[in-house]
Amino acid sequence: MIRATDIIVDLQYGDCGKGKIAHALCTTKDYTHVLRYNGGGNAGHTIFHKGQKFVTHHIPAGVFAGIKSVIGPGCVLNPEKFFEEIKSLEAGGINAREMVRVANNTHVITQAHLDEDGKDVKVGTTRQGNGPAYRDKYARTGVRAESLPELKPYLVDLYDEWFEGGDVRILAEGAQGFGLDIDWGEYPYVTSSHCTVGGVILNGVPYSSVRDVWGVAKMYETYVGKKEFQPKDNPVFDKIAEVGEEYGATTGRRRQCNWMSMQLLEHAIRINGITDVVFNKVDVLRSVGEWAVIDKGSIVPFKSEADMKAFVVDRLVKLGIKQEKVLFSENKDGF
Ligand code: IMP
Ligand code: MG
């Protein structure tokens, strides 16, 4: 029986530091499961664990805290990539074979999907076969994990896992972000999955089990893909990219940067029913020495970090978020 579900969603375009928050929550709360609920090999987590650097794409950060980690049917899975990750985690002393599971009904990314996505020029995808795999799932021509013999040791029936095996407390950790959501992002510059709380529920998680919903953002925005995003008239954004080390974990592409949009943030907070917000990388704007947001199409500059924080907190409080539930975090610390 599911006793509680806490959720982490990204309020912007991915890469806001969900993995860090997941790691912090996993080590302070007693979850029985971490659930990856959307996306495929397009995501990338960079995690420093006991002095070693790990990059995972499919496997959620919970595995580093020794918690059973499930890849749910909201995801698409590249088996080759999955086995590489298992191997590298095992080599790093993490018992991934024991802890990682894949739902029977998760769809698989095939070589044909990878080949097709490799030719993308329109969206600027990560070329990991994501879009074609989801398309085939919905066209009912896809392949599910349960039909791959090599995945057999990892497969679970998620109904049994959630409801037939004692108390379950889930941390749901997704991929990408609100601005890339298939429905709420700027179509077609989106990914092919559901990046909101709605996407969690689709993995057999009853809405009534949801407890805390953590929204993760950065103090500025980054986006990777084909649309024009970074303003050309201000060198500050190149500085932010450099100081913030804004390069993708999956593709190595330089992320485009801009000030944070208050409207994107507000929409993401309301649609996800956020209870707690973390703004990451506060130290990046501090090093750059400039602060601003975009509000209703206009740039609103601030003289200091404190002024920007006060403005943002005030707006979130107006949306019903409790002031003490808005946290600001440095690039490197746990919270
Ligand atoms: P796809 O998900 O690979 O199909 O790519 C669709 C869009 O989402 C592209 O703009 C990608 O750059 C973006 N995207 C996909 N995954 C991530 C991610 O983990 N972080 C940031 N952007 C992503
Ligand atoms: Mg990432």
Image (cartoon, rainbow, N blue to C red):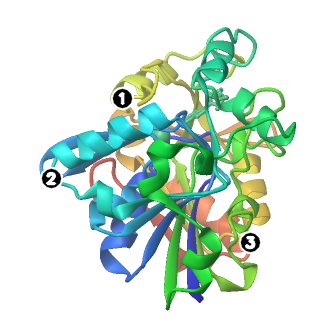
**Which element type, helix, strand or loop, lies under badge 2?**
loop
Q: Amino acid at mark 2?
A: Gly
Outermost residue, right direction? 139
* Between 194 and 332, the one nearer to me in the picture: 194
- Nearer the camera: disc 1 or disc 2: 2
In this view, 321 is above or below 263: below
Residue 121 lies left or right of residue 290; in this view the side is: right
Determine crowd level at label 3: few under 14, some 14-19, many 20+ residues with C-alpha closer than 10 A: few
| Sequence-wise first label, 1 or 2 | 2
Residue 234 coordinates in the image, percent (x, y): 57, 17
In-front residue for pair 307/72: 72
Q: Residues within 10 Å of mark 2 (few under 14, many from 20)?
A: few
Q: Is residue 302 left or right of residue 266?
A: left
Return the disc, 3 or 1, that comes first in the chain's sequence: 1
Q: Write the residue at 59% across / 78% down.
A: 160
Mark 2, residue position: 93
Task: State the residue at coordinates (45%, 28%).
Answer: 250
The kind of residue tagged 1 is: Glu
* Residue in the foreground of this view, choosing between 42 and 317: 42
Taking the image as drawn, is residue 335 in sight? no
Name above or below for residue 96 compared with residue 255.
Answer: below
Q: How much space separates mark 1 and mark 2, taking CA atoms? A: 28 Å
Q: Is residue 293 above or below residue 195?
A: above
Disc number for residue 245? 1
Q: Amino acid at mark 3?
A: Lys
> Which mark, residue 318?
3
**Element type at marker 1?**
loop
Real-space CA distance between mark 3 and mark 1, rounded to the nearest whole angstrom = 33 Å
Q: Which residue does the image show at 55% across and 76% down from the upper left? A: 161
Residue 201 lies in quadrant: bottom right
Q: Position of residue 27 (x, y in %)?
A: 30, 73
Characterize the local packing of mark 1: few (<14), some (14-19) or many (20 or more) Cα atoms within 10 angstroms: few
